[in-house]
Amino acid sequence: MRIGIPKEILWEEKRVALAPAGVDSLVRAGNTVYIQSGAGEASHFTDDEYAATGAQIVYSAEEAFKRAELVVKVATLTDQEAEMLQEDQILFSFLHLAIGRKNVVDNLLKRKITAIGLELIEENSRLPILHSMSEIAGQLAIQVAEQYLESHINNGRGILLGGITGVAPAAVVIIGAGVVGVTAARAALGRGAQVVVIDKDLNRLRNIETIFHKQVTTVMANPYTISRGVSFADVLIGAVLIKGEKAPHIVSEEMVKKMKKGSVIVDVSIDQGGCVETSRITTISDPVYKVYDVIHYCVPNMPALVSRTASYGLNNASIGYIMNIADNGIGNALLGDEGLAKGVCTYNGYCTNNIVADTFNLECRPLRIFSTN
C-alpha cells in the first residue's frame, strides 16, 4: 500500500504521525511510504533517518497526499488539507468532527474518503490511541499549571504547588476521573499538592481511592459540588470526555467569576470544545488569557509540547492498526477489527457516525463492509 505522511500545520502541531521505527516496519512489509520533508523535524527525526528506513522524501504536502492510498496524520484536517484529499483515499488521523467545520466533512463525503478518527478507535472498551495522548496531557496539565501559579507569570497567585512546612500546598481540583484525570492526580500528588477529583461515576471514584490509597479526595459530581470545588481551587483541570461528542460546559461562567484571583484553569477538554464556559482555543506560542483575573490555558494539542515523546507514543499505539490496513486492505481490516471499525466516520460517500450526522444534519448510514478475499 502507498502511505503518505504530510507535515502537520494546524495549531503549531509539532508531532509526526509515525516515527522512523514505524516507517521501517511498513517498508519491510512491502509498503511504500511517502513522507514530506521536515515532517519529523520538530520531533528531532531527520529526513535522513526516514530515508534510511526506505521512506521516499517528498517536498510538498500535496505530493504526500496525492501519491498515497492511505494518509496518516496527527491533527485534524485544515480546509487546505481537505482539498488535497483524493477520491477513495483512507484517512487515519485525529478528526474531532463533532466540533469541526462542515466544509471539511463535505469534502470527506464528496471524495468518498474512509475517514478513521484515532480518538474513536476502541479496544476492550478503551480508547488505545487516545489513551497514550491523554497520559501525556494529564502530566503536562500539572506541569503547565505549576508554571502559571508563579508570581512573575501573568500575575499568578504566587503559590508553590507542594507548599512548605507550615504553609499549605495548592489545591488542585480535577473534573473527570478518566485517563487525563488519573494521570493529572498522580502528577499533582507527587508534587505535594492537595488533590480533589470530581466525577459522576462512582466506580471511577472508587478506582481513584484504590490507586492513591485515599490520599486523593473524591467527590460525586453535581452542580453544587462542582461549584464548591471550582471556588476552592488554585488549579482547575478540566478533564471531561464524552467519546466523539462536544464536551459539555460543566463549569459555568458564573463559577469562574467566583474563582480566586490568579488561579489557573487548564481545560484539557478544549480539543472537544472545552468543559469550561469561558474557554476558547489557544496555541502553543500564545497559550493563555485571563477572564475575571483567572488564567486560562486552552491548548488543544498539549502533547505537542513534548513532541518526541508524543510521536513515539502515537507510533506505538497506531502502528498495529496501520499495518492491519496495509496488509489486509481497508475492507478486511474493518471486518476483522470491530474496534477499528468504530473509528470510521465517513465511508463511500456517507456519514457513518451518529454524532457527526446529528451535528451537521446529515443522513447516517450504518457501516457495511464486505470481504475482498
Image (cartoon, helix red, strand yellow):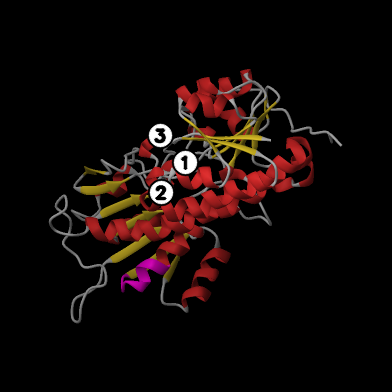
Residue 339, percent from left and from top = 70, 48
Mark 3 nearby-residue class (10 Å; few <14, some 14–19, many ≥20): some
- Mark 2 vs mark 3, CA separation in Å: 15 Å
Lateral position of residue 62 relative to residue 259, left or right: right
Q: Tag 1 or tag 2, which sits nearer the N-term?
A: 2
Q: Tag 3 or tag 2, which sits nearer the N-term?
A: 3
Q: Residue furthest right?
A: 373
Q: Read off the magenta span.
A: 186-193
Mark 2 nearby-residue class (10 Å; few <14, some 14–19, many ≥20): many
Q: Amino acid at mark 3?
A: Leu
- Which numbered tag is attached to residue 43? 2
Which picture quadrant has residue 367?
top right
Which element type, helix, strand or loop, lies under badge 3?
helix
Disc 1 target residue? 272
* Foreground pick, 182 / 276: 182
Residue 352, percent from left and from top = 68, 31
The secondary structure that most of the magenta stretch takes on is helix
Q: Amino acid at mark 2?
A: Ser
Q: Residue at x 39, y 43 (%)?
A: 41
Quarter placement of the N terminus: top right
Residue 142, percent from left and from top = 34, 60
Q: Residue at x 34, y 44 (%)?
A: 298
- Mark 2 vs mark 1, CA separation in Å: 25 Å
* Foreground pick, 92 / 122: 92
Disc 3 target residue? 10
